[in-house]
Image (cartoon, grey):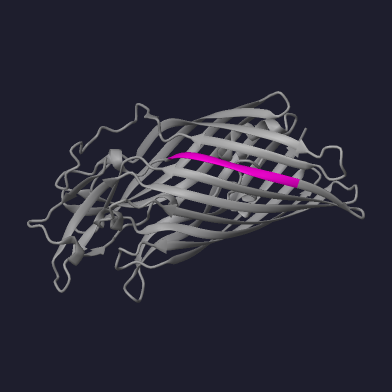
Amino acid sequence: MDKVSTNFFKVLPLISLGIVSFQAKAADDGFSVPGTRAMGMGGSAVAYISDSSALWYNPAALALSPEHKDLTVEFGDVIKPQLATNSDGTLDLYATSQELKYASFKNGGFSIAYFKPYSWGQLVNHYGDLARVETEASEIKIAFAFGLGENFLLGASYDLITLDDKVIENLTGESLPKINEKREGWGYTVGSLVKWTLFEDTVSPFDFRLGVNYRSKLMAETEKGLPDTNPDRVIDGPISEKTLMSRPQSLSYGASVSLPITLWSFSVVTSLSAQQEKIKFSETEYAGAIKEPESDNTWAINAFMEPEYNKQAMGAEIQIIPGNVDFSIYLRAGQTKSEMELDSKPDYRVGLIPSKGYESNSFGAGINISHFHIDGALEKRNIHANPLITNYKDTEETLASVSVSFAWQ
């Protein structure tokens, strides 16, 4: 349930107030797409991707190639929080940083992988002051997948989650609040995949797949878990470490179709993929300030919400295989739209979340030479400003990634 605290001495009509946000980031905006191949297809992967990055999107797909083994490393840009002021007085809340995004080993239906999918900035209350906290999420996922007959696959992973928290600055006070710098816990992922080959007896059979994947939130913290330091969620209390950013729960489902065609001595496989995802964050604190028009009076305010997002993604991949050589070329493109669900009764609380979602266009390419796979991807992301915020505008970020895989049987 949403809870709201303020340090107002009197109640002012909300319609007369302007919201000034100091937030360093929203929720889903902090997501960096794991896997270069999936990134090139806009993250539309729940029913398509079958390499080791399937450990993130749908672990059931690991069973599509039971004899396949690979080692993969991905290095690229991730979204990072910042708090800078532009020349026009608006805030710049986003930056990028090049880091190790993903590394994995796959042996048939078994895989173990490291992911760094989220990086958030968050403004929180600390005894009436506004403190900026940055949180980086990383995971080690251990998965196993198997087939039930020829057409139905199941997979699951056990996820070891680490959340590194750091207080960056106190915007309205002098002392820097102290918090625990690490939260550790676990979660799980469960996926299923159904596949058919249509028109199998023709020259160009269709490969059709349906996929569903559920990723839990941070289920339980280990012995390094945190006490609830502000159970009443009051604005004159300490930072509520239980309401810092954390891994959300996610339910995604989608479909893909692949069509092989032979042209002269070339084989061309065209694949299309579409995906819908529902994302829900746990109780999270958002803080900011409300300013009275035609006055310098400003009050700190915070709210505890559970943001929800709807995300749609579409992607395409063309694989070109020249002749009978052990060599192929991949071309990819994709689109993504992530949109925050606003309350049925809008009020200033949603104005404390700086963006209402983002849209992105992605492109990618890859080559496969014998046992080696090299892929690259580029994402142009347009982050939409929340119109309720007076000092923030749309932001565009460019993200690039490269991955190298060694595969064998």
Q: Quadrant of the N terminus?
A: top left
Q: Answer left or right for 286 relative to 314.
A: left
In the image, 375 versus 63, the foreground residue is 63
Q: Position of residue 155 (x, y in %)?
A: 60, 29
Q: Answer left or right for 124 relative to 13.
A: right
Within the magenta stretch, is there residue 81? no
Work out whether residue 154 can be spotted.
Answer: yes
Query: Which residue: 42% across, 40% down?
Result: 247
Q: Is residue 102 above or below residue 221?
A: below
Q: Is residue 49 above or below residue 40?
A: above
Within the magenta stretch, is there residue 257? yes
Q: Position of residue 42 (x, y in %)?
A: 59, 53
Work out whether residue 173 can be spotted.
Answer: no
Q: Position of residue 128 (x, y in %)?
A: 16, 52
Q: Answer left or right for 27 relative to 193.
A: left
Q: Which residues are magenta?
A: 249-258
User: In this view, which residue lies farthest toward the left?
Assistant: 9
The quadrant holding residue 65 is: top right
Query: Which residue: 67% across, 44% down?
Result: 256
Magenta: main secondary structure equals: strand
Q: Is residue 162 above or below residue 119?
A: above
In the image, 200 versus 70, the foreground residue is 200
User: In this view, which residue lies farthest toward the right?
Assistant: 264
In the image, 345 versus 279, the foreground residue is 345
Q: Quadrant of the C terminus?
A: top right
